[in-house]
Each structure stands twice: as C-alpha cells, then as structure tokens.
Image (cartoon, helix red, strand yellow):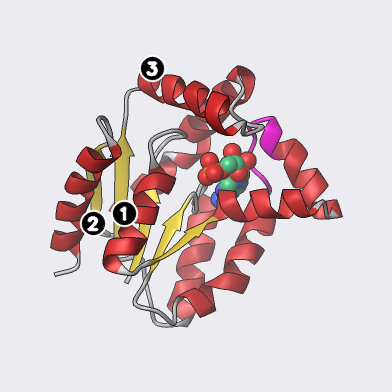
Amino acid sequence: MIGIIFGPPGSGKGTQAARIEDEFGLKHLSTGALLRAEVSRGTPTGKEVGRVMAAGDLVPDALIVDIVRSLLPEAEEGPGVLLDGFPRTERQAQALDAMLADEGHRVDFVIALEVPEAALIDRLLHRAAVEGRSDDTREAITERMHEYHKLTEAVLDHYRRQGVPVERVDGTGSPDEVFERVRRVIGISSR
Ligand code: AMP
C-alpha cells in the first residue's frame, strides 16, 4: 500500500502521518525531515540544501528523487509507505510512478488536507515560536505558499487523471479531530 499525505505547508501532514504510521503501520517517509537531517549533518549538500530551504524554495527534483529512490525499496518491504512532502512537482510524481512501476506497485491513495490560508499562516508562525524552524519566517512562508500553488497543487490533478483516489480531508480543528476524518478515509481506501 502506497499512500501520499498531501497539503499546503502547515496543513498538518507530518502530525497526521505519524499517527497513520502508528495506527496502520505505513512507514512514514518525510522528505522535509530527511533534508533537515542532511542540513544538520553539515555536509556540502546539506549546506546548499539549507540555503534553499531557508528561502522557502524547493530543492531540485533530481536531488530529492535520488533520495527517495535510495530509501523506497527498504520502506516497501513493510506493510506500506506513506509519503509526506513528496512528490511536490509533476516531475517528481512522474519519477515516483516510474520507480513504483518497476516494482509492480502504484500510488493507492492520496489524502489531501485542506486548511484555509489564514489558518495555515497562523499555525506556521506558532510553530516558528515553538520549534524555530528556519523556514517558518514570514518571508519563507510566503514563498512556500507560492511554490505550493505554482508547482505542487498540480500533483493532485496528476493523480486524479490516473484514477487514483484523491480524498479531500478537512484539516481544521485539533489533530485528534483531523485524525478521525483521516482514519475513516483510509479505512475506506484500503478495503
Ligand atoms: P516540509 O517539511 O515537507 O514542509 O519541507 C520543508 C522544505 O524542504 C520545503 O519547503 C522544501 O524546501 C524542502 N522539500 C521537502 N520536500 C521536498 C520535495 N519533495 N521537493 C523539493 N523540496 C522539498
């Protein structure tokens, strides 16, 4: 089972993905977390990636596709994989589809979290105060929203065109309330 948790910055993808991993055993693969780990290792790639992330831009498709390609086979050995923050462009989606097709797999479902933009910005500014993420500044947030609308939203249409179930879930309210909605949707998709 291969799922994608999808949504704009601040929509709660990471929070919901961790809960889905606990409840359904799908391995949570977050490209943002992988990149942050690379940055904290201080490698030359990490330094370059850190600059791109802090500006709120997307890292190059080829880099992120290579990272996912190196990790996906092991993740696929378990009951399933939940991709968080990937794919973020049409190109990444095509690369993912090709990787999965090599193994005889495909994307089984997409959960698209929906939260109004004003609430997203509030959440991200709150997270900035709590976690101090370098890309939760007002400028970087604006850029991330812009990239989301310009490049990432198209990924939903990519999967709709293929007939993959794209389940829209109201992402407002507490993490528990959102998870109740997510749980219902995954229960239906996996039947
Ligand atoms: P996230 O934790 O998913 O919000 O990602 C944080 C940042 O990591 C993004 O704003 C991008 O700079 C970078 N990033 C994460 N995933 C990707 C991806 N699939 N493609 C390009 N950049 C990514």
Residue 181, position in %: x, y?
Answer: 18, 45
Q: Is residue 144 above or below residue 153?
A: above
Task: State how far apart marks 1 and 2 are (Cα).
Answer: 6 Å
Residue 130 sits in quarter: top right
User: Which of the two residues, 102 or 14, is positioned nearer the viewer here?
Assistant: 14
Can residue 61 be seen in this snapshot?
A: no
> Which amino acid, mark 3?
Ala
Visible residue check, residue 119 = yes
Q: Tag 2's secondary structure? A: loop
Q: Which residue is mark 2?
A: 165
Disc 1 residue crowd, few under 14, some 14–19, many 20+, Cα 10 Å: many
- Magenta residues span 53-61
| Beta carbon of the mark 1 residue lies under 8 A of ligand 1 | no
Asked if the residues shown at circle 3 and circle 1 are in contact, with their CB atoms under 8 angstroms apart, the answer is no
Side of 186 where 81 appears, left or right: right
Q: Looking at the image, which residue sits at the far front?
A: 130
Figure quadrant, ligand 1: top right
Which residue is at a point 63% across and 19% down the rendered structure image? 139
| Image quadrant occupied by the C terminus | bottom left
| Residue occupied by mark 1 | 110
Query: Is disc 1 placed on a helix, strand or loop?
Result: strand
Q: Kindly identify which numbered label has been placed on residue 118.
A: 3
- Contact, mark 1 vs mark 2 (Cβ under 8 Å): yes
Secondary structure found at label 3: helix
